[in-house]
Amino acid sequence: MTGQALGKPGGGAHTDDNAAIHINVGGFKKRLQSDTLSRFPETRLARLLHCQSKESILELCDDYDDTEKEFYFDRNPALFPYVLNFYNTGRLHVMAELCIFSFSQEIEYWGINEFFIDSCCSSAYHCRKMDQDREDWDDRSEEGSTTSSFDELLEFYSDATKFDKQPLGSARRRVWLMLDNPGYSVASRIISILSILVVLGSIATMCMNSMSEFSLVDGEGQPAEDPRFETVEHFGIGWFTLELVARFTVAPDLLHFFEHPLNVIDLVSILPFYLTLLINLVVESSPALANLGRVAQVLRLMRIFRILKLARHSTGLRSLGATLRNSYKEVGLLLLYLAVGVSFFSVMAYTVEKEDSEDLSTIPSCWWWATVSMTTVGYGDVVPVSIAGKLTASACILAGILVVVLPITLIFNKFSLFYKRQKQLEDAMRSCDFHEGIKEVPSVNLRNYYAHKVKTLMASLSNMSRSSPSEHSLNESIH
């Protein structure tokens, strides 16, 4: 039984039987004329007419009865009438009660393009599909948030269980929770507030030390640091060092302690001070190395990194860090847009302003103007003077607004997601109770967690099954 035999009379059978094929879709039987199917040669049923062997037939259907000359399809019989109507009229119609996702998959299986949806249904169909895609994206984002939060919570409890096998485990765990979990107890809140005040005080003294009103001069006419500021600095360094040593001492896993970004920030906040002391000792012992004093001045300015210590006590800063870490594609896209825009408008400005403005007489000098214009900063230090230059500047500013706004929306959506996840995670950590040991993991909806995992797996398999008709037929046959 070949496709050519299906389309040609003869072979002892009736002519009308040979000019038609018999199909069975989930129990729904139908006899279709081959000339009707041939009107749409790219569809699955029309391709059956050109099959030369049973193996090629089984690539397009789930089963084939050679005696009854019947093709079997394990598909939804309720949706097949829409396919039949398409072969008869050449247009697709979508009822309001249909699931758009199922209908889209069904017509894709039968090889029918969405282009054939009639104008009366096309607008509503695509609007509903866009809404469905948006809901799916929200579900995937929420799924990632739930899964990631659950994994972090399990990691938190896994670290807490390590203390049970260590000396003084219970006492060390209480100190660990008090230092690494702000808001866990009254003591942890007090330590958190004190740490914030020390950070702010250290930054304030560094800023005040740069002001002429607070500058002092030693006997040799060299600038000297105010003893009051020096006292605050030493107290801050002592506090930061004590914090880091205490966290390192009670850490559940010393080998992986500095893999945590917040612990690296703690180390960087005190490292410039001790490096500065070491450099000053070297310079005093070896006057030939006096140039190292400049390195010490640079290291003193690195104290500004202490402001990052506030991330340990701020949900917003941690969420911002997670957003930037997971938005490198969007940030790269933003930088790419800006680079293209700056390159284009700098050449335009150079072309129209090189004879009228000395500030825009070279392309590199135009880069600065294009950068501050596209980012809508507009310092006004370099401005075009000709009418053509002003029109170019207007286009540059408008293009900059569009370029900056588009990726920023994606980054903001991710920030909202990570902020929500971080708040939920902190609430779960602060509600933990280890006074009587760890008996169980906190209340987490495992059913939803594994449902998200299974949903992701099924979606991946569905995408794979749509890669080719033969693969889809194989998967259907297995099931």
Image: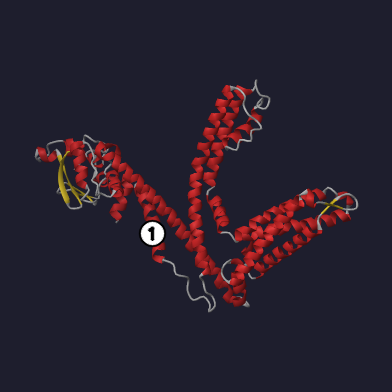
| Figure check: 171 above or below 20 | below
Left or right, 236 with respect to 418, comes to right
**In this orientation, which residue lies closer to the viewer: 332 or 321?**
321
**In this orientation, which residue lies closer to the viewer: 319 or 49?**
319
Residue 43 in percent (x, y) is at 26, 39
**In this orientation, which residue lies closer to the viewer: 118 or 212?**
212
Scheme of image coloration:
secondary structure
Quadrant for the N terminus, please. top left
- Residue 260 can be seen, yes or no: no
Q: Secondary structure at mark 1?
A: helix
- Residue 385 can be seen, yes or no: yes
Left or right, 167 with respect to 470, comes to right
Question: Within the image, what quadrant is residue 272 found in?
Answer: bottom right
What residue is drawn where x is 64% and y is 71%? 250
What residue is drawn where x is 76% and y is 57%? 273
Residue 291 in percent (x, y) is at 83, 47
Residue 310 in percent (x, y) is at 62, 58
Residue identifier under label 1: 454
Question: Within the image, what quadrant is residue 454 found in?
Answer: bottom left
Residue 19 in percent (x, y) is at 14, 38
Q: Amino acid at mark 1?
A: Val
- Count the marks: how many? 1
| Figure check: 414 above or below 36 | below
Disc 1 crowd rating (10 Å Cα; few below 14, some 14-19, many 20+) is few
| Figure check: 386 above or below 115 | above
